[in-house]
């Protein structure tokens, strides 16, 4: 068997990683931290405040054990309270925040929090289907556009993954580079990928704590998703998505079904 080398097998991945590597002669502590700036919010868009809701009293052990990817969802909608809990757990602003420093659940390089969170809504009570942008500081959603999201379109957008079209909502994490790259340069892109992972894990655990189901999504058509979400890819990049809904089976049953599906595919 030939020895695997990054440079030969996946030259683009190799170029990215080595291009953002640090050594003695190019390492620095980073530039000045830019001031805390607002997110992508637009005060002219229709506004929906989210209720004040808290996570249920579930142990971390129980939430971790219940975190199983879900690829079969019921048609039942989510409630606004459930959506509020999920968004706050993922990227909401905490009670210890002040004007100079935000406090959110995931760690963030320099406390700059360069991610944005957009919702593709199919089925949430008292919320029109469409695209919504989460505004953490005001605990609410601004409606980017009202639009039906047909199953065939969502399956196409997420590169043939049919379960996405059954979910009640799909979250889109995107990276607003100007908030952190000015301090960290190209290394800041690595930090953004790490932060997206921290944020998504928080979201997954909150989903499990609520007894809901989700599946994380790295496969999608970037530019088409950006257009749908109202994102300008010249300054903000979609990184990571998650389909969330009411599962049609308990976590243990989902694990057994997944094992059977894998066995049938062998």
Image (spheres, rainbow, N blue to C red):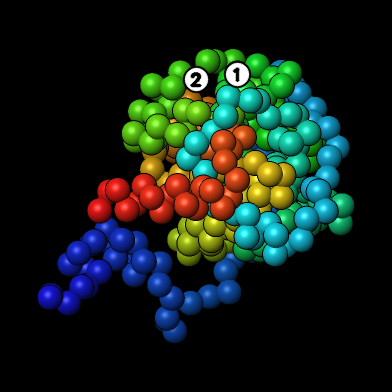
User: Residue placed at 17% from the left, 67% from the top?
Assistant: 8
x, y percent for residue 237: 47, 42
Badge 1: residue crowd in 10 Å (few <14, some 14–19, many ≥20): many
Question: Picture coordinates of residue 113 (x, y %)?
Answer: 65, 53
Q: Residue at x 70, y 59 (%)?
A: 62
In the rendered structure, find residue 129 and report the number of the disc placed on it: 1
Report the disc number at residue 176: none
Classify the position of the N terminus by image quarter.
bottom left
Front-most of residues 190 and 94: 94
Q: Quadrant of residue 118?
A: top right
Q: Which residue is mark 2?
A: 149
Nearest to N terminus: mark 2 or mark 1: 1
Q: Position of residue 240 (x, y in %)?
A: 49, 46
Q: Nearer the viewer, residue 109 or 156?
A: 156
Q: Secondary structure at mark 2?
A: loop
Residue in the image at 45% along x and 47% along y: 257
């Amino acid at each position: 068997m030939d020895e695997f080398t990054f440079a030969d097998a996946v030259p683009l991945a190799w170029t990215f990683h080595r291009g953002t590597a640090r050594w003695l002669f190019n390492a620095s502590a980073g530039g000045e931290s830019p001031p805390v700036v607002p997110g992508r919010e637009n005060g002219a868009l229709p506004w929906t405040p989210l209720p004040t809701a808290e996570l249920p009293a579930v142990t971390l052990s129980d939430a971790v054990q219940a975190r199983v990817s879900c690829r079969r969802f019921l048609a039942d909608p989510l409630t606004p309270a459930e959506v509020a809990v999920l968004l706050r757990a993922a990227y909401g602003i905490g009670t210890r925040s002040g004007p100079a420093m935000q406090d959110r659940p995931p760690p963030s390089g320099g406390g700059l929090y360069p991610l944005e969170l957009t919702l593709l809504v199919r089925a949430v009570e008292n919320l029109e289907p469409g695209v919504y942008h989460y505004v953490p500081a005001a605990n609410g959603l601004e409606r980017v556009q009202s639009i039906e999201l047909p199953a065939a379109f969502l399956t196409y957008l997420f590169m043939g993954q049919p379960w996405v079209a059954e979910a009640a909502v799909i979250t889109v994490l995107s990276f607003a580079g100007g908030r952190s790259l000015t301090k960290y340069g190209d290394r800041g892109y690595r930090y953004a990928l790490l932060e997206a992972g921290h944020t998504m894990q928080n979201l997954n655990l909150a989903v499990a704590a609520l007894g809901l189901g989700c599946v994380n999504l790295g496969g999608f058509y970037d530019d088409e998703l950006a257009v749908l979400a109202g994102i300008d890819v010249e300054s903000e990049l979609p990184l990571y998505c998650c389909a969330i809904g009411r599962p049609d089976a308990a976590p243990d049953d989902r694990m057994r079904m997944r094992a059977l599906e894998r066995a049938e595919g062998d």
